[in-house]
């Protein structure tokens, strides 16, 4: 790959990753009741933006993910480590009045509460989100769940795979002659967390104007459904039932993955000029004169024949060789990489997308500010109750509270 | 499916979807230079939160997606319609000094600028992001691109399929004996837009404290890479090369899709108690006594045998029947739905996830606030230059400007 290192505007590596810059949300305190992945993804993003995160965990076992693999040689969970950077941990038994009073004292001084229990659990603990906002009018309470806080399915148990299945994203993914395919990461959990972050920070911005807090209700199903772009264009717009189409684009061609001598290459041609460049580079300029491939509409209608013609040539050499030729010619192209290779790219390194925190490598922060710290948190994920004593001292309920 | 309609806390449908509530970001003005999908997704989210969006389009053709399918019977593009709700359109030729002066007059009064050109294009137009922030110290300028504003690959052409290929998400998706599989929606474009929104709203919150604007640099590659959860836990944490595992969970079983007499059913069992309930419901209680399936670790290690044993039973009846039995027993379960069926769910309807705007059905807003409007924008996507005359009058450059 070429190594153009010119930066544009303020966007130089030194400026973005300078750890001495202030954090955007360093004035914000979050009480974090979340577990597993969707909620902790949200509060990890808040930690990356510099907020103080107080994570409340169940005494004894803590967050479920502490017992979930993969585990490193020292027996600690990578799952927990990835999702809980930058947080303080306190073990509280919320069914015990003294511990609940500590949690309430934290909430009284906090800007944000985040939880991802099943609907109703917070209320049974005496921490109903709407009640909390009534009691603390500037507080923002975000609930992240599989199906949201209301609706016929809202009490259904939800895991990422359940939401991928019901949202339509699994049915949309895969080959036409294959089966519905799970996205190879817990995308519905993660989208729940990211949209939760969107809701919280939107409410923080609004609070500066209105002086008011609010509840926020984010469902993993709503979040995943809202990303179903082409499928929903078909279903809602032109009233056609969408179907799986493998790796190709529904309305552009050639725009797909293609077999070379050794492995797949993604090639994306969005207009006639680039198609001319492509077929010249492949040594098949006559394809540009073929009436089946004259326009993008023609190429899309005849994409199978076009793919066959292209792969006849592509299979004569390795993907890396074609990659270099096509990239030099200006055709959008990429090898299909295993993420173990992606993480080794110089590009990923200079953008701080892998960082070392507490002796372990973890993913970096994808939001880069000119004016604020963009490394994200450098504080390791805590051991259970690491900050318990200090937090109990700081938030000792006043006599008569709780 | 069951129809429990109790709502918790403030989260009732009437409260969330009440259109008379104020919008969270109704005080924010955005000048929107974005095209196609990633950038317009970001500014559509800003429109849903109530911001004023002024979309600048190329005279004559406008946003590329106006010419991209799918098209409705009247010839209008669903692609354009979905991504541009709630925006005002003005056609400006930014290479023409008079039009550029209009754009600059808008920027002078705006809170936010969003663009998704290739790096360097804004600077060549005289609109370099860092310069704009220097000139207007409270301005937030967000650049969304495939690879970001710096790094060895930053000038490479990027489409969603290119980023899915290089990020590792395509290689992680699919069956072990199949090929890398594109996620069946343009997830990298959408993640670029959503993380752009995160960056903008974070910067708006910070501005209230610091008084300062900032540039924001979001790369679709960084955004997608950061969601690679299990793959990165393997690659960065335990130093194993991740591989495709189909629809199953890497460390829980049974947690997969399973064949029934007619179609797939997703079943997610995360603990021993639920496994007991599952095998009782399947009429195979002896499986809970089988040493191969005693613990979650055993079940994960022997997941292929377990799947075989489960499918022997499941294939004796239809998925809908098993769905009802398992759901009634409390096992997390879902049919694998086509999004055309998902959009018909009563749950999706009562949560406002499909709405009618300007006579067309479009996806709803997945962020629901107690205190603010959560329907999102109800203003249709504009025709090209619909608001041109009004905007030119409102933002007429003062004599001597530009």
Image: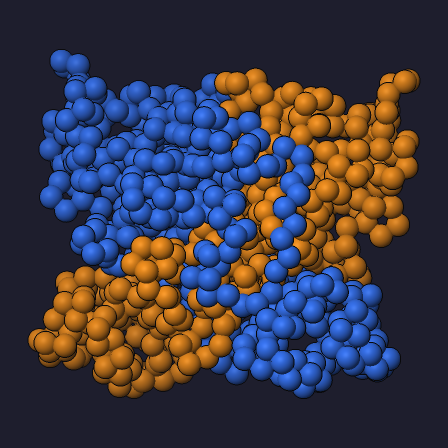
Chain colours: A orange, B blue
In the picture provided, is B390 more to the left or to the right than B290? left
Q: Position of residue A164 (x, y in %)?
A: 55, 61
User: Where is A392 relative to B355, above or below?
Assistant: above
Quadrant of the rendering where the C terminus of chain B is positioned = top left
Which residue occupies 67% across, 26% down?
A: A133
Q: Tell me, yes or no, if residue A220 can be seen here.
A: yes
Quadrant of the rendering where the N terminus of chain B is positioned = bottom right
Where residue A294 sits, quadrant-wise, is bottom left
User: Where is A179 relative to B69, above or below?
Assistant: below
In the picture provided, is A303 more to the left or to the right than B377? left
Q: Position of residue A184 (x, y in %)?
A: 54, 66
Q: Relative to the observer, which residue lies in front, B270 or A186?
A: B270
Q: Relative to the observer, which residue lies in front, B195 or B386?
A: B386
User: Where is B82 relative to B236, above or below?
Assistant: above
Q: Tell me, yes or no, if residue B32 can be seen here.
A: no
Q: Position of residue A129 (x, y in %)?
A: 68, 33
In the picture provided, is A169 more to the left or to the right than A7? right
Count of numbered badges drawn on the protein? 0
Which residue occupies 55% across, 64% down?
A: A165
Q: Relative to the observer, which residue lies in front, B117 or A213?
A: A213
Which residue occupies 59% across, 74% down?
A: B319
Q: Position of residue B148 (x, y in %)?
A: 39, 47
Which residue occupies 49% across, 77% down?
A: A179
User: Where is B357 relative to B52, above or below?
Assistant: below
In the picture provided, is A177 more to the left or to the right than A21? left
């Amino acid at each position: 790959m070429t190594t153009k290192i010119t930066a544009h505007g303020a966007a130089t590596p030194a400026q973005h990753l300078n750890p001495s810059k202030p954090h955007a949300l360093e004035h914000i305190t979050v009480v974090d009741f979340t577990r597993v992945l969707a909620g902790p993804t949200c509060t990890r993003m808040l930690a990356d933006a510099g907020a103080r995160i107080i994570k409340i965990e169940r005494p004894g076992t803590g967050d479920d993910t502490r017992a979930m693999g993969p585990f490193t040689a020292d027996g600690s969970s990578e799952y927990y480590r990835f999702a809980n950077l930058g947080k303080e941990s306190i073990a509280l038994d919320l069914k015990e009045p003294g511990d609940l009073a500590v949690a309430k004292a934290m909430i009284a001084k906090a800007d944000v509460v985040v939880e991802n229990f099943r609907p109703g659990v917070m209320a049974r603990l005496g921490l109903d989100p709407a009640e909390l906002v009534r009691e603390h009018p500037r507080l923002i309470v975000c609930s992240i769940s599989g199906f949201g806080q209301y609706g016929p399915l809202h009490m259904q148990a939800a895991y990422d795979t359940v939401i991928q299945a019901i949202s339509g994203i699994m049915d949309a993914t895969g080959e036409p002659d294959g089966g519905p395919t799970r996205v190879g990461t817990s995308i519905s959990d993660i989208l729940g967390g990211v949209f939760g972050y969107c809701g919280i920070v939107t409410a923080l911005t609004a609070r500066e104007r209105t002086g008011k807090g609010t509840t926020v209700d984010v469902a993993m199903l709503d979040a995943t459904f809202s990303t179903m772009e082409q499928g929903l264009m078909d279903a809602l717009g032109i009233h056609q039932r969408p179907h799986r189409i493998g790796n190709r684009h529904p309305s552009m061609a050639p725009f797909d993955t293609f077999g070379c001598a050794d492995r797949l290459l993604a090639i994306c041609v969005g207009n006639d000029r680039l198609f001319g460049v492509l077929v010249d580079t492949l040594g098949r300029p006559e394809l540009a004169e073929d009436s089946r491939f004259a326009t993008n509409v023609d190429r899309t209608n005849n994409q199978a024949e076009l793919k066959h013609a292209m792969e006849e040539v592509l299979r004569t050499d390795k993907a890396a060789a074609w990659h270099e030729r096509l990239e030099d010619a200006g055709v959008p192209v990429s090898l299909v990489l295993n993420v173990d290779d992606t993480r080794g790219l110089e590009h990923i390194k200079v953008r701080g997308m892998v960082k070392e925190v507490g002796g372990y490598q973890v993913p970096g922060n994808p939001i880069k500010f000119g004016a604020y710290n963009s490394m994200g948190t450098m504080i390791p994920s805590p051991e259970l109750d690491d900050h318990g004593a200090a937090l109990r001292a700081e938030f000792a309920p006043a006599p008569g509270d709780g």
